[in-house]
Structure formats: C-alpha cells, structure tokens
C-alpha cells in the first residue's frame, strides 16, 4: 500500500534534483525527467500568499521572476475551492471590463459579441456548487451539484467560442477567456470530487487538458510569431554565400534559454536538442519564431570552391528560399550571383521592439505556467483514483508537526514510492 509523507519544507534531495534537471516540475507535481514517474506533489495551504514566486523558484519555475497574478492558478487542485474560483473569476471579469472598453470598436467592426454578462451564469453556478457542499441530505447535494455542473458546461461552450473569436481576430483578451474556460473545468471537476465521483473528475480534466492545450498553443504561436524574437548576425563569406555557425551570433533582448523553453513546450520533439541556439534555429524552420537576419560581409574567400576545399565532406546543399542550407555546418550559399555590399545589410526591414518582446514573452510564460498547473490537477486526481483514496481523505494529508512561529506557504506530499500513472 502506498503511504504519503508530508512536510512543510521541500527536501534537499528534491531541490537538488530540480537544479540538476533530473526532476521537472509541472504545476504542483514533481516528476522524474526520464521515467516521468511522480516523485512529489506541492500543495499551497495559503491560497493568497503574496510571495508565490519564492515557491516557484524553489520548485523550478518557467521563469523565477514571473509576475504572478490572476492568470496563475494555485498549486494543487485540492486548494481550489469554489470561493477561490469565484474570487479569481471576479478579478478576470474586472480586467475584462477594462479591456473590452478599449477594444469594443474592433469588436463592433467584426460584428461580434463578447458579452461580459455571461459571467453572471458562471457566478450563479459557483453559488449552487458551494451550497451543495453544505447540504446534509445526499440527494439534495447531488441535485444541486448536478445543476451547477450543467451551468458549468454551458459556460464552457460560451468561453470556448469567445477564445476562438479573440484569437482568430487578434482581439487582445484571449488570455482572459482561456483562464475563464480553465476555471469552468476546475469548478466542474471539483463538483465531481465533492461527490466522490473520481472517474468523472478525471474525464473532465482530461477533456479540459486537451481543449486548453489546443487553445493555448494557438494563442502562444500567434504571440510568438507576431514579434521578431532575435537578430541573427552572420558573416557573409565572399560574394556568394553565408556560413552560419562559424562566427554567427544570435542576439535577443530575451535570454535564449527562455525562448528555447517556450519552443520546446510547443514542440516536445525539440527537447532532444541540447543547444538553445540550435533549438531556436529549428523552431524557425517550423515557423514558430521569426529572426531578423543581419549580414556582415567579410572577404575571406571569393567562391564556393574555396569553401569546398576547406570542407570536403559537405553533402549536397538543400534549397531554402533565397539561400541554400547545408545541414552539416549550417552553410548558406546565395542563389544569386550579385556582389554583396561591404556595409551591413538587413534581409528584413523590421526591427526588434525590445519592450514589446519582453511583455510578449512574459505573457507567454504565464499562460504556459497556468496550463501546466491545470495539467498537474489532472495528475493529482489520477493519483487519488489510482490509490483508491477518497477526496476528503486526500484533503486531510498534512504534516503532523506544528510549525514554529513562521508562516507556512505550502506542503510537500511525497509518496513512499514513485508513482507511474502510465
């Protein structure tokens, strides 16, 4: 039988595993990077803590300096009660009201309708769900919870449509509607958990993870390709070709590691590439990012024949647009036979807007972190399902030793053996 050890501190061996990248954190779940087995779970016990970034730093965050706000949900689905969901919802609604006033003209031109009053239905459903948890008669509890679930389903359809509209038409409230949609799934799953319908909770969160992943990927790709993220400084060798990888630098106002992490989340196959720069070049080929190519002419050699003498093992080059790319040394040979000017030239007329890019990347990191936490909720409920524990007993897991005068932000739940959910 699997037992659980709970502690107020994250053990050093887990912290070291996160630092060495032997372990990874997805929301509030810590997993073995290779086997994907669950090593531990984090549960916030002070839902409104102001220094949540401290916890994220300790637990291996996407970016340790994330500006945490309403777009970030708490660690652990067991923390998200109906009152907290309502509080998050009100914050989103307030933010939407402010944003919708600014973008209403664009919405009107599109003959679209993004009605803020739809939140009244969601709030009513939360009231029903909260009342259901206080009812004594099982039949009354089930009836009230069922009514709430039906309203959550209705809200899901509306918010999903609003997400599609706001992303497709580039209306800048998509993240708010994605979060609203996420909350409907969390609330619906919480209803099932309160009724001890664990299987239904798992199915609900699985459905939510699939739907949300689709929307978040689309949202992130739109944001990422809307900005030039880096400048490629490449040496033009002679008059006819450019060699990347030999004297090439990749410059960006954002750390390359942060950009690479985003690309790896979008395309998991990029995790097989270790070098951040290589990840970004590969991501460019997949149209995930856009670079500004900045070419510097250096008259080292005068023809491709000279390069062939230096690199006799070059395979046949591959044509890509204006250039021909060789995968071995990432050599680019110009298909045009004109002379290259001595002064630097830009292959694109756009400039990188550093301030905008920083904001875009921070928004992307926040929405990815939010999705990862939702995915962790699914893992947490699957654990409850696997071990056959009731949700109420799961809530009772807590350290037995009293804290000594310091404010506790979270607990760490460690199974007696790593858990494989298959």
Image (spheres, grey):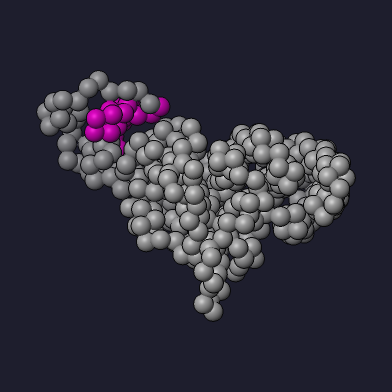
- Image quarter for residue 232? top left
- What is the number of callouts on the image? 0
Confirm whether the magenta stretch covers residue 330: yes
Residue pushed farthest top?
316
Residue 366 sits above or below residue 161 on the image: below
Q: Residue at x 31, y 28 (%)?
A: 325
Residue pushed farthest front?
1
- Image quarter for residue 37? top left
**Residue 316 appears at what percent x and percent y?**
25, 20
**Residue 338 appears at what percent x and percent y?**
31, 31
Stretch of the chain drawn in magenta: 321-340
The residue nearer to you, when weighing 72 against 47, is: 47
**Residue 236 appears at what percent x and percent y?**
27, 40
Q: Residue at x 49, y 45 (%)?
A: 2
The residue nearer to you, when weighing 190 against 137, is: 137
Confirm whether the magenta stretch covers residue 335: yes
Instruction: Give the prevailing secondary structure in the magenta stretch.
Output: loop
The residue nearer to you, when weighing 187 against 271, is: 187
Q: Is residue 11 left or right of residue 83?
A: left
Q: Residue at x 60, y 69 (%)?
A: 50
The residue nearer to you, when weighing 365 against 291, is: 365
Residue 4 sits above or below residue 217 on the image: below
Q: Residue at x 64, y 37 (%)?
A: 202
**Residue 69 appears at what percent x and percent y?**
63, 61
């Amino acid at each position: 039988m699997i037992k659980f050890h709970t502690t107020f501190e994250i053990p050093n061996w887990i912290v070291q595993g996160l630092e060495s990248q032997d372990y990874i954190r997805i929301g509030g779940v810590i997993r073995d990077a290779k086997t994907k087995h669950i090593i531990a779970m984090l549960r916030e016990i002070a839902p409104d803590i102001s220094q949540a970034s401290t916890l994220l730093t300790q637990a291996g965050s996407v970016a340790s300096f994330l500006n945490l706000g309403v777009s970030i949900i708490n660690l652990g689905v067991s923390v998200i009660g109906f009152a907290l969901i309502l509080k998050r919802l009100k914050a989103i609604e307030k933010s939407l009201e402010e944003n919708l006033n600014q973008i209403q003209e664009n919405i009107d031109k599109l003959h679209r309708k993004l009605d803020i009053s739809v939140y009244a239905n969601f709030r009513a459903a939360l009231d029903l769900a909260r009342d259901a948890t206080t009812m004594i008669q099982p039949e009354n509890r089930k009836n009230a919870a069922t009514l709430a679930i039906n309203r959550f389903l209705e809200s899901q359809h509306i918010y999903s449509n609003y997400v599609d509209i706001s992303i497709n038409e580039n209306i800048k409230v998509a993240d708010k509607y994605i979060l609203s949609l996420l909350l409907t799934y969390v609330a619906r799953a919480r209803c099932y958990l309160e009724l001890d319908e664990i299987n239904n909770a798992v199915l609900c969160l699985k459905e939510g993870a699939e739907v949300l992943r689709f929307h978040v990927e689309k949202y992130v790709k739109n944001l990422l390709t809307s900005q030039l993220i880096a400048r490629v400084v490449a040496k033009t060798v002679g008059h006819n070709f450019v060699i990347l990888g030999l004297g090439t630098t990749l410059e960006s106002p954002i750390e390359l590691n942060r950009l690479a992490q985003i690309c790896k989340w979008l395309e998991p196959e990029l995790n097989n590439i270790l070098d951040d720069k290589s990840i970004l070049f590969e991501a460019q080929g997949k149209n995930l990012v856009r670079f500004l190519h900045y070419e510097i002419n250096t008259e080292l050699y005068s023809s491709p024949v000279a390069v062939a003498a230096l690199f006799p093992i070059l395979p046949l080059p591959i044509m890509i647009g204006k250039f021909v790319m060789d995968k071995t040394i990432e050599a680019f040979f110009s298909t045009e036979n004109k002379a290259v000017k001595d002064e630097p030239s830009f292959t694109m007329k756009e400039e990188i807007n550093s301030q905008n890019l920083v904001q875009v990347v921070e928004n992307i990191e926040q929405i990815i972190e939010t999705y990862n936490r939702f995915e962790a909720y699914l893992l947490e409920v699957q654990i409850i399902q696997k071990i056959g524990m009731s949700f109420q007993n799961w809530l009772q897991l807590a350290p037995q030793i009293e804290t000594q005068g310091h404010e506790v932000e979270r607990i760490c739940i460690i199974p007696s053996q790593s858990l494989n959910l298959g």
